[in-house]
């Protein structure tokens, strides 16, 4: 009797579990599985996580202040005492690399955030409205594409005065048109689809259609573009700093560090090589991530 | 075809107006008085005022812009504040060096990128495919300015295989100016010594500038080739017993090249950005270094000249690509 009740209760409970569907953990696992099947994504994410952790823990992991000088021990090669060596002023390379990671990641993310937000908004509007708004946007992006990005960024940074903040502004200004074009193209294709037409027929306000129906469907290509672009932004900021239009010494920014190490490259290789290696790894990781995401999210390439 | 070219040229005019308006507005943003910069710290107020009057800097910006465009239509780009020479003359001196470098870099990228891309696609998942993909991944991620420092340190400082910075050895007289590109000019004037020297000087900067584009073209060729190789008409060609070479080169390649051609046009734009960094490292007296020096001294007439020239190059490159399409694929209607 008891047994019967027991089993009935157990069955009931099992049925309730089934009705509730998979647990949260199961759902997360199911969402993540396709991502984990892409080796490019996994490798990219692992590399990026390494640098994100390094940036977050920079104050904890740095043996010294990144600006603290110790000229006596200047130009020491990498050793147990100085893991990544020291520069000509005896500043600890490890500390400078850690803080440099912080700077590059934060600046890169800010560039991509501002450029993609601005570009996406304009692209949504132009693509949805069409007509003259679209025409104007396309011509403006034509103008930006005709500018060699680095020369325009240089001119902007030069006009505003060379600094890391102005390099950030300059790279954002040259980066947004890609997003505007991308999103516009997506919206043009999407707005003739049934679900958008249905929404319009139901009298849903335009802004709601744009934000709730169109925007979410453009997120996949946006994400792919953003991961490639983040790498591009980090390289561009380093490049601007390298030629003197971005971060200024003694800031431990990667481009500045490569520039400071350029005359020592044959003798004290570690000065320019470590920051360059960091850029290579971060940008390479982002490119792998972008490749993996594109293969995953672009149905045309899924068969490959 | 002629109508297509005319329409593109009309678009180019629009782009040039936009580019000049943006650069001109940037010049207005500069917090420093260009007249004071040009005349130095010891200039008296009267001198500065006279200078401002001479260059029209005392007039409102819109009027200044209209005057500038009016002169531009007569081929006058104004005078550089830094070099004190007409900007047009400066550009004539520096542009050929950049063109020579960019063409050499693009040549390397096209030959190496497309060859490796085809090999990687045909031998998919083989060792050569793996090597090509890593080569492309590094090329797309390595900062060009570090690559420049690296090849200079290795192939010049250490191995002495190639000469160091500059366009030609100091003890050799540059060839008489015909195109302004040393390699072509020395070839045209039959000066073998100058040809050898300028060619050797070109190798390292061209490789540096070309690596990124090589990587881009390699990836594009590989994926485009892979897509084409699975198409029915390729299988038909194989099935009727054509040799692999014929199928590959005559049937697959032509179609696979269409997206690659687009990429070449787009990459041309990024070459000029790369040239700024490459020229800085190799002391290459081209447009990029001229632009850098001009921005440093807030010489906006010169910056304006550079951006206008650059803004012509990119749309022109893309127009050539579109004409190239037509040759490659008669189905494409040039509109």
Image (cartoon, helix red, strand yellow):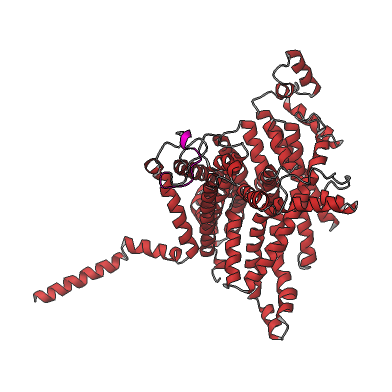
Is residue B244 visible to us here?
Answer: yes
The location of residue B71, given as percent across then percent down, is: 84, 32
The location of residue B134, given as percent across then percent down, is: 57, 62
Q: Which residues are magenta?
A: A71-81
Is residue A67 visible to us here?
Answer: no
Taking depth in this image into account, of B58 and B13 the one nearest to the observer is B58
Tell me if A7 is positioned left or right of B121 in this view.
left
**Picture quadrant of residue B78:** top right
Residue drawn at the location 80% of the way across and 37% of the way down: B90
**Picture quadrant of residue A22:** bottom left
The location of residue A2, given as percent across then percent down, is: 9, 74
Residue drawn at the location 71% of the way across and 40% of the way down: B289
Q: Is residue B73 magenta?
A: no
Tell me if B40 is positioned left or right of A68 in this view.
right
Tell me if B3 is positioned left or right of A291 in this view.
right
Q: Is residue B297 above or below residue B138?
A: above
**Picture quadrant of residue A158:** top right
Q: Is residue A22 above or below residue B80?
A: below
Toward the right, the furthest residue is B189
Toward the left, the furthest residue is A1
Taking depth in this image into account, of A265 and A183 the one nearest to the observer is A265
Q: Look at the magenta stretch and give its main secondary structure.
A: loop
Taking depth in this image into account, of B6 and B87 the one nearest to the observer is B87
Taking depth in this image into account, of B154 and B84 the one nearest to the observer is B154
Q: Is residue A79 magenta?
A: yes
Give the quadrant of the C terminus of chain A: bottom right
The location of residue A241, given as percent across then percent down, is: 59, 39
């Amino acid at each position: 009797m008891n047994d019967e009740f027991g089993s009935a209760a157990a069955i009931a409970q099992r049925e309730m579990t089934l009705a509730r569907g998979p647990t949260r953990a199961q759902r997360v696992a199911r969402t993540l599985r396709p991502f984990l099947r892409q080796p490019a994504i996994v490798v990219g994410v692992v590399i990026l996580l390494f640098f994100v952790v390094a940036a977050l823990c920079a104050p904890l992991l740095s043996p010294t202040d990144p600006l603290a000088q110790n000229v006596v021990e200047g130009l020491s090669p990498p050793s147990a005492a100085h893991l990544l060596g020291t520069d000509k002023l005896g500043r600890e390379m490890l500390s400078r690399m850690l803080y440099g990671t912080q700077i590059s990641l934060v600046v890169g993310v800010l560039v991509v955030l501002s450029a993609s937000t601005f570009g996406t908004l304009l692209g949504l509007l132009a693509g949805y409205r069409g007509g003259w708004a679209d025409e104007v946007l396309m011509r403006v992006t034509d103008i930006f594409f005709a500018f060699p990005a680095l020369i325009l960024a240089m001119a902007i940074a030069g006009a505003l005065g060379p600094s890391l903040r102005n390099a950030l502004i300059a790279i954002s200004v040259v980066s947004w048109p890609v997003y505007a074009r991308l999103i516009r193209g997506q919206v043009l294709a999407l707005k003739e689809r049934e679900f958008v037409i249905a929404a319009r027929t139901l009298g849903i306000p335009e802004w709601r259609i744009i934000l709730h129906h169109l925007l979410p469907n453009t997120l996949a290509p946006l994400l792919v573009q953003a991961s490639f672009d983040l790498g591009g932004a980090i390289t561009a900021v380093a490049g601007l700093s390298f030629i003197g239009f971005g971060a200024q010494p003694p800031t431990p920014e990667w481009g500045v560090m490569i520039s400071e190490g350029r005359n020592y490259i044959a003798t004290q290789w570690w000065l320019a090589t470590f920051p360059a290696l960091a850029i290579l790894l971060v940008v390479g990781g982002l490119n792998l991530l972008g490749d993996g995401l594109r293969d995953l999210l672009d149905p045309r390439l899924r068969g490959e | 075809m002629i109508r297509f070219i005319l329409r593109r040229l009309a678009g180019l005019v629009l782009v040039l107006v936009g580019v000049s308006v943006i650069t001109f507005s940037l010049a207005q943003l500069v917090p420093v008085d260009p007249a004071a910069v040009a005349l130095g710290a010891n200039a008296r107020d009267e001198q500065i005022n006279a200078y401002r009057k001479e260059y029209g800097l005392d007039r409102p910006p819109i009027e200044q812009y209209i005057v500038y465009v009016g002169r531009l239509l007569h081929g006058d780009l104004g005078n550089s504040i830094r070099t004190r020479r007409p900007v047009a003359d400066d550009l004539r001196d520096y542009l050929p060096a950049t063109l020579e470098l960019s063409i050499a870099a693009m040549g390397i990228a096209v030959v190496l990128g497309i060859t490796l891309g085809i090999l990687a696609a045909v031998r998919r998942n083989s060792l050569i495919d793996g090597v090509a993909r890593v080569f492309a991944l590094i090329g797309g991620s390595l900062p060009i300015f570090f690559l420049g420092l690296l090849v200079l340190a290795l192939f010049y400082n250490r191995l002495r295989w190639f000469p160091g910075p500059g366009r030609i050895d100091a003890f050799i007289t540059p060839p008489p100016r015909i195109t302004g590109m040393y390699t072509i000019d020395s070839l045209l004037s039959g000066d073998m010594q100058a040809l050898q020297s300028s060619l050797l000087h070109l190798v390292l900067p061209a490789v540096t500038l070309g690596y990124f584009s090589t990587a881009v073209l390699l990836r594009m060729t590989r994926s485009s080739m892979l897509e084409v190789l699975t198409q029915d008409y390729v299988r038909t060609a194989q099935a009727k017993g054509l040799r692999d070479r014929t199928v590959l080169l005559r049937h697959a390649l032509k179609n696979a090249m269409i997206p690659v051609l687009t990429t070449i046009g787009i990459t041309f734009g990024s070459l000029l950005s790369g040239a700024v960094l490459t020229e800085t490292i190799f002391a290459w007296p081209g447009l990029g270094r001229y632009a850098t020096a001009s921005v440093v001294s807030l010489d906006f007439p010169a910056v304006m000249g550079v951006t206008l020239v650059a803004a012509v190059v990119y749309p022109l490159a893309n127009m050539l690509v579109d004409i190239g399409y037509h040759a490659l694929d008669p189905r494409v209607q040039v509109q």
